[in-house]
Image (cartoon, rainbow, N blue to C red):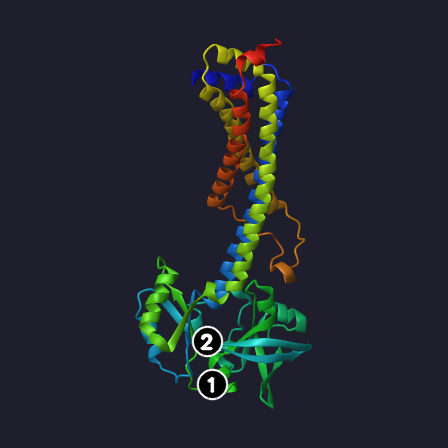
Amino acid sequence: MRIIHFLLRRALLPERGNLTTFALWISVLGVALGIAQLMLVLSVMSGFQGMLQKNYTRISSEIVVIPALDERRDPRVTEKLMELPQVRATTPFYFGQGMVLKEGVGGVTLEGIEFSSSKSVVPWEEIWVEPPLLGKQETLRNWIWIGVQLARKLNIKLGDKVRVLIAEGSRKRIIPFFVTAITKFGIYEHDLRYARIDLNVLLQLFSREGFEPMHKLALNPGYDIPQTMEVVEHKMGEDFVVKSWREINQNIFLAVQHQKLVLFIVLEIIVALAAINVVNLLLISTQNRRRDVAILRAMGMRFSQVVWFFVAKGSAIGMLGVGVGIAMGLVLCKAVEYFQPEILSEAIYNVTHLPLKVNPSEVAMVAVVAFVLCVLFSVLPALKAAWQRPVQALRYE
């Protein structure tokens, strides 16, 4: 192996540069650029996944317990849920449809919440753009929290009086509400289409008084959601359906995962194209060094050693490309995160800045795939050089 180490050092770090050496470092740079751009794209997609997970967890909580049938309200439901060691807090809620009227009309889903218990499940301090007005929240019965995008659309401000249209068959009612808070969950459509009111008021408006509402659960740290769902299902029986936040928003997360997979495959092809340069480089190297290889073979260098030399050269290029590419990718991600222009439309992407998250496992996967491609592409030139007979190579020297 000493001879292979010596030849590699001469090939990668020659005393005097030549065209082959320049082509070698161009190959390294090509692999590095492919890895850097793949890291940037995967970091953006992982950032979007993390952002969506955080926001949708705040919207629907980690686990939701839904009555399977129209059951009469049972005060023991909350007690039974709180008996589980996995459950940190629970709060009831329910949905209804309505329209908010002010300077225009906005169709909304009204979510009825129990303010006192919801504070233990939903981090309202992070969601309120303008927190509830002190005094009014406790004294008013018909209070409403408006999403920030709906507030912008209808020019609604904190403390304004709005009208809510409720339709039940042919019967329509308009009820006045006072805006006591503005909320922002970070999902554009949700902030445009949802509003919160008192749970008892909503149940009364939609003639659901006395019926069991749905329940949001917040888990204690260290407990796994799938396992907790099984425990809750066993505890509550067949009268309730248990859903996780991922199941409720399944289509959105599947779409993001599929996009991420497709982008990975497409950009990995670009990395593969950069790795193909290794084939061209090693073919040139085998042609330029056929005399040296022939002499070494004539002196007793084995077939396997010739193959290992050229494979090791391709592997070294791959390792250099991977190392430089990871460093460039990390710098590129930091630069984009710090200097990025505000070019994203919140109505389309839910954010105005690219959320970046460098996932070590994804970086490792990209590095391994790129390295394996460089090694595989170096096998053909290695075999071509090893199969060359010394007599034919030295015939015209």
Identity of the residue drawn at 34% across and 72% down: 81
Name which residue type carries label 2: Phe
Asked if residue 333 shows in the view, the reply is: no
Identity of the residue drawn at 36% across and 82% down: 74
Name which residue type carries label 1: Arg
Crowding at dot 2, Cα within 10 Å, few <14 / some 14-19 / many 20+, comes out as many
Tell me the SS state at disc 1: loop
Identity of the residue drawn at 48% across and 64% down: 58
Quarter of the figure that contains the C terminus: top right
Residue 72's place in the image compared with 345, above or below, is below
> Is tag 2's residue or tag 1's residue first in the polypeptide sequence?
2
Identity of the residue drawn at 55% across and 24% down: 384
Q: Which residue is mark 2?
A: 93
Work out whether residue 84 or residue 150 is closer to the camera in this orientation and state it: 84
Tell me the SS state at disc 2: strand
Q: Residue 341: image x %, image y %? A: 66, 49
Say the numbered circle drawn on residue 208: 1
Relative to 209, 180 lies left or right: right
Residue 70's place in the image compared with 349, above or below, is below
Quarter of the figure that contains the N terminus: top left
Q: Residue 360: image x %, image y %? A: 47, 43
Crowding at dot 1, Cα within 10 Å, few <14 / some 14-19 / many 20+, comes out as some
Q: Residue 9: image x %, image y %? A: 51, 18
Residue 176's place in the image compared with 294, above or below, is below
